[in-house]
Amino acid sequence: MVIKHNCGMAVTHRLAEAYGFINSLQHRGREAAGIAAIGRDRIDVIKWRGRVNALDVIALENIFESSRYHTFFAHVRYATSGDEGAVLEDAHPHVIGGRKEHRGNHILIWDCDAAAVHNGQVDANFFTSIEGRCSSSCDTERMLHLYIARGEYELMRRVPGAFTIAIADKRREEVIVMRDSSGIKPGVLGKIGGKYCVASEDIAIRKNSAEVKEDLDPGTIYYLAADGRYRKQFVCSPRPSYCFFEWNYLAHKDSILNGVPVHTMRDILGRQLAEQGDIGHVDIVTFLPRCPEIAAESFARAINRSCVPLFYKMKGERSFQGTTAEERAVSIKNNLYLIPGVIASIRGKIIVVVDDSIVRGNNIRRARQLLYEEAGVKEAILLSYTPPLGIIGEDNIPRGCMFGVDMPPHADRFIARGRTLDQISAEIQMPVRYLSVEGMLKAFEACGLPRQTLCTYCIGGRHPFQQ
């Protein structure tokens, strides 16, 4: 099965910039990181286990002598399937050729013929012509082999999505960056030090003192030259199917995706929750840290209540990105706690907990335990501003994501699948309310994104690549 992942990537012309960019994209993956150093006659790669700062930039500058390279691309990743022991092998960049040096928690690959980093997920059915050439099960490596066999134009035409990918080829001086015609996965063009760069989100560009130029056009190939200039080539007609979950959860709260600020979207989603009503009396509004904070504050203002932080996390890591169920459970139990001193103020009160989404329900079960067993609240009500995920659609096809988010349709772990709202509430042992699909779509349209430009497959919508 193809490895599924949600990742962050960057392309720039200085090693320290590439490192800074992926450090600013750490929220998109924490299992492994990697960098490709690209010169006029060679491509060298390093991949390491863990967060970006597990390997510092001084060490990288000692490994990659700056005078030998003109461009660097970098990647952060979380994996959702495959052997845990293969984390480094499956990490990006993926390569063709090269001499490997295994050094415990990192791998060096010298003098590669080609390398690629990728954000998204591509169905294995598009790669039947290159079967047997790949050393891993990762779709990124398959895309790289398809590029070598057919070229970038044919790759764009044959594979409808979902990808934003960067490819370095030792036979060519330019680095190739492509965003598929659906635009499901984000990508942004920027400029730093007079040279053009690319990142998955504009927050990485802005946090590193670079200038945001434009979102990468869907269906377009960008060529980044060694001297910092770029050119672009339109290949496929855009058919926008932007992933709504990028705004609801995945992207940084200060990012702007396809011209729409994430902060603004979450604010409107909170107001839509309030307009939907049906929860009765509320004493205090809170949220599960940290993504839903904006929506919770907006919801609280709309119902004239206070939004009070009640929980804290030891670390900002997302349990969603844990490799195994055990790792996710430990991440939640050892990471989510009540803020000291809040118990006296919430005992016997009715609390609304705003969350961005409910996949398995693990986070809210931990929150329920804290609120009822430690704080003694009268009632806690969960409000999700994302409609039920992983349901069975009206066409009787189980939903989920095959386009880069850890929600495969075949997974038997969606709490909403096959359950009524009352049954979901009974499973979590607290009342649960979801923003309706119509309510969510109204929020996106209020931000200038028509509903037909969104991929809503995971909540019952159409397949983005099928008519």
Image (tube, helix red, strand yellow):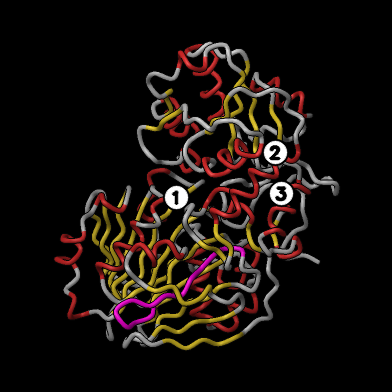
Where is residue 20? Give x, y as percent.
30, 62
- Residue 193: say if magenta: yes
- Dividing the picture into quadrants, the one containing residue 304 is top right
Where is residue 35? Give x, y as percent.
32, 65
Q: What whole-number distance in Å separates the C-alpha atoms at marks 2 and 3?
A: 12 Å
Query: Local crowd at mark 1 within 10 Å, few (<14), some, or many (≥20)?
Result: many
Residue type marked 3: Met
Query: Local crowd at mark 2 within 10 Å, few (<14), some, or many (≥20)?
Result: many
Residue type marked 2: Ala
**Of 157 and 26, the residue lying toward us:** 26
Under circle 1, the secondary element is strand
Determine whether 422 is above or below 20 in the image. above
**Of 224 and 449, the residue lying toward us:** 449
Please give the name of the residue rendered at 56% of the width and 28% of the height, measured from the top-left corner.
364
Q: Which of marks 2 and 1 is nearer the N terminus?
A: 1
Residue type marked 1: Tyr
Where is residue 1? Give x, y as percent.
57, 52
Q: Name the residue under label 1.
A: 78
> Are circles 3 and 1 on residues that touch, CB within 8 Å?
no
Please give the name of the residue rendered at 47% of the width and 40% of the height, measured from the top-left corner.
290
Please give the name of the residue rendered at 17% of the width and 80% of the height, measured from the top-left corner.
67
Please indicate whether residue 11 sits to the left or right of residue 423 in the image: left
Segment tinted magenta in the rendering: 184-196
Mark on residue 440? 3
Please indicate whether residue 211 sits to the left or right of residue 44 in the image: right
Under circle 2, the secondary element is helix
Q: Name the residue under label 2.
A: 274
- Residue 28: say if magenta: no
